[in-house]
Image (tube, rainbow, N blue to C red):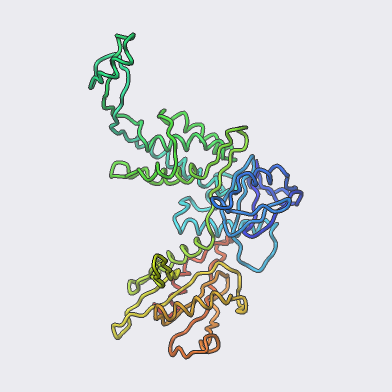
Amino acid sequence: MFTLKVFEHQTIKVGEKLIFYRGDKGIEDTLEEKYVTALWKIYNEKERPFFTPSRGGIKFCEWVGIIKVLDLTLEILPKADKTDNFNDEKEHNKWQNILIDMLRVCRSLDTPSASEAALKLKSNSILDLYIERFISEINYLLHVGLIKKYRKEETNYSALKGRLLLQKHITKNIVHKELFFISKTTYDRDHLLNQILAKAIKILPLICNNQYLISKCYQLQLNFPEVKEVKVDNSTFDKLTFDRKSDSYKTAVQIAKLLLLNYRPDVSSGSTHSIAILFDMNKLWEEYIFRMLQKANDGTLLIHNQKSTKFWNHESTNRYLKPDIIIERTNSALEKEYVVIDTKWKNIYDQVNKVSMEDLRQMFAYHHYFDAVKCYLLYPGNTSRKEGDFVPNSFFKKDLGLKSCGIIISNAWEIKNGRVGLNKSIGTEILQSLELIS
């Protein structure tokens, strides 16, 4: 079983030499046609637009995360720097660390640190981190005791216990007079929460590449009580409610949902089970910046994420303006001031000519509609913020007075203790550069 690490927007082809990881060792080998064919099978332009099939290969887009097909785990990593070296272990480790940190901040991956997990699992797969976390949660629930719930059950029973369902009793037991068809209330562990967890436990060995974790998966199957098989879809999780008694199940159920809803069993051959857990990198970057700004807020600001405002209404047609982030502040004159930030997961660094005309029109619209004093496009980078404030007249041909717009190339990642990871002070740095906090 192997892990192949690639980058967003990268194209891979059959026969191409790539680095495949088994455990923590990378081996250069050629990409076999069977893996590309298996990926083609799970492609769906509307429901699963995670990549585009190309002639003899696959072209990835803005989705990052993991796809498991056959005995290969494909890990799609983000990339926003100048280097084009897609086949380098250091680059793989760097961007994997950045992705894991970003998922953790956005609460999409609650795991131990990457270094701790790597030492314990001897694995480089993000999928293994999800599975390790799920196993840890189930073991905790088993330790404290799985909860019981009341459930109604209609069944044939050898004793009259509960309420006799006379009509069904006559129909079903005309021959078996020793049985009673009854309705009774049972208090046990066979309820929806445990049924969901049991179903997730069952698929773990089918999607896991790590032998250490596979053995843990089988141990769980032995220790987890038998419950009824349940069909799981989105509506199943919509039915769930958590109370004080079941609150400890939340994390385990969230990971089970992620695994089950993205799992695709092959019912024909049983050998090409697949799973895809991916995230739109543009939305992930936006969510990350929003959370880091919230963390850095000193209490004087109101920070809104994706605040939608109706812009156009004609008959049954509505159109909305939806900036990524709006920061609201009350100035010394007790007037509200607005700063708009539009996050862009693009590699531009100090090349201002790469800013698209569409993005500039967005800034112009936000300035006027929200009466914003500042409006910025925020890009990822590993350099300090570039001043680069645009002179409004040179772009808009209109005097905007004290208003300004420009770009921020954020200091998004840094090297600490020999490990590349996200800059934990990015929110503070952005707010200070915009003179919103001291």
Q: Position of residue 200 (x, y in %)?
A: 47, 38
Examine the rendered structure and indicate whether residue 404 appears above or below residue 286: below
> Residue 71 appears in which quarter of the rendering?
top right
> Residue 321 appears in which quarter of the rendering?
bottom left
Q: Position of residue 18 (x, y in %)?
A: 72, 52
Q: Residue at x 62, y 54 (%)?
A: 51
Examine the rendered structure and indicate whether residue 31 appears above or below residue 229: below
Depth order, front residue of 315/32:
315
Question: Looking at the image, how many numbered discs can be counted on the residues?
Answer: 0
Q: Classify the position of the C terminus by image quarter.
A: bottom left
Depth order, front residue of 120/11:
11
Q: Position of residue 302 (x, y in %)?
A: 35, 71
Q: Is residue 290 left or right of residue 17?
A: left
Q: Residue at x 44, y 90 (%)?
A: 401
For the view shown, which residue lies furthest in the front direction?
A: 315
For the view shown, which residue lies furthest in the right direction?
A: 15
Q: Residue at x 50, y 53 (%)?
A: 113
Q: Is residue 380 left or right of residue 238?
A: right
> Residue 395 appears in which quarter of the rendering?
bottom right
Q: Classify the position of the N terminus by image quarter.
A: top right
Examine the rendered structure and indicate whether residue 248 appears above or below residue 152: below
Q: Position of residue 406 (x, y in %)?
A: 51, 80
